[in-house]
Structures are given as C-alpha cells and as structure tokens.
Image (tube, rainbow, N blue to C red):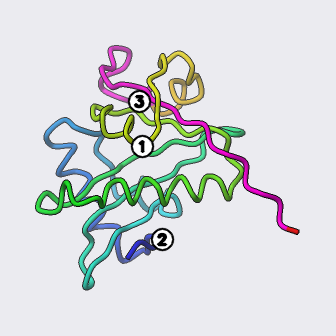
Amino acid sequence: MIRKAKLTDVKAIQALVNQYADSGQMLPRTLNELYEHLRDFHVYEENGALIGVCALHVSWEGLAEIRSLAVRNDRVKNGIGSTLVRHCLEEAVQLEVARVFVLTYQDGFFKKLGFAVIDKKELPHKIWTDCLNCVKFPNCDEIALVTTLPAEPSAK
C-alpha cells in the first residue's frame, strides 16, 4: 500500500534513506530535513512495515523533483520503486507540475519510466539551493533526467 508519510514514519524513512547514503548512492537526510519536508514523502507499506519511500519536492513553478527513492534491500527489483515513482508522478499531474526531474546514479531505471537525460545546467533552481550544500558540489557525478507530464484534464 502506498500512502503519504506520517510523523511516526520519519525514523524508519531516515534509516532506509541513509542506508543508501552510507554506500554513496544518495544524499543522507537528517531528521530535521525529514520532518520539515514530511509532506513530500510517500511510503510503501506492507503489514505495518515500511518497505520503500519516495519524495516529490516542488522546486519552482512547473518543476518538481523526485528524491530520496529507497527500497528495502530484500525487496529491490520487485517493482516497488517504479510504483512509488509513478505515484509521485500522478501527484505531480494533480499539482499541475509540467516537468519532473531527478538526479541519480540509476539513470537506466528512470529512462524505463520515461525520463530523458538533460544537462544539470538546465536546473538552476536546484543547483542554487540544494546543490550548494552538497559535499560533491561543484563536481557532482549524478545524472540529471527529466520527464514532461501531461496536463490534467479539467474537471467539468
């Protein structure tokens, strides 16, 4: 089941995300960051256990980012990650976001979901907010990808 994250999920989200951060696959998230951005997060839960997490963060007018996608190691390659990303993209359509981007080392995964590689220079709002505080800045080796979303049909 996918649902919006709750306050009681924060420590489990941090453990899952930071497991990937410890191996250099994504940026770590502090408890403070997770509490401040809790509304961005969706979780995949089974039998009360948090199996996966993904966030949709609105960056600017018409632009959002998929971030902190993590799936428990024993459940990788079961479609949970792609289900979480699709769920976030559906929310982006509802919010009338035109484009969603991601910075990742897993470009093949996102290409299968319709994302295309772009130059990071096309993401100035990202670079001048989050990236400035990253230990890898300005030598980021992540790959930037973007997808353009269909407009949500007007309700009649």
Point out the tag, 1 or 3, that comes first from the N-terminus.
Answer: 1
Which mark lies nearer to you, 2 or 3? 2
Q: Is residue 81 magenta?
A: no
Q: Which residue is mark 2?
A: 4
Query: In the image, residue 44 lies at what x, y percent?
Result: 34, 69
The vertical placement of 142 against 36, above or below, is above
Q: Secondary structure at mark 3?
A: helix
Whole-Å distance between the Cαs marked 1 and 3?
Answer: 29 Å
Q: Amino acid at mark 2?
A: Lys
- Residue 147: x and y, percent? 54, 36
Question: Sequence order check: which comes first, mark 1 or mark 2?
Answer: 2
- Marker disc for residue 113: 1
Q: Point out the stretch of residues depicted in magenta.
A: 131-155
Q: Nearer the viewer, mark 1 or mark 2?
A: 1
**Quadrant position of the C terminus in the picture:** bottom right
Q: Residue at x 27, y 72 (%)?
A: 50
Please identify the quarter of the rendering in which residue 113 is found. top left
Please give the residue where the numbered disc 3 appears in the rendered image: 133
Q: Does 149 lie within the magenta span?
A: yes
Label 2 and label 3: CA atoms lie apart by: 27 Å
Characterize the local packing of mark 2: few (<14), some (14-19) or many (20 or more) Cα atoms within 10 angstroms.
Answer: some
- Judged by its main secondary structure, the magenta piece is loop
* 140 versus 44 height, above or below: above
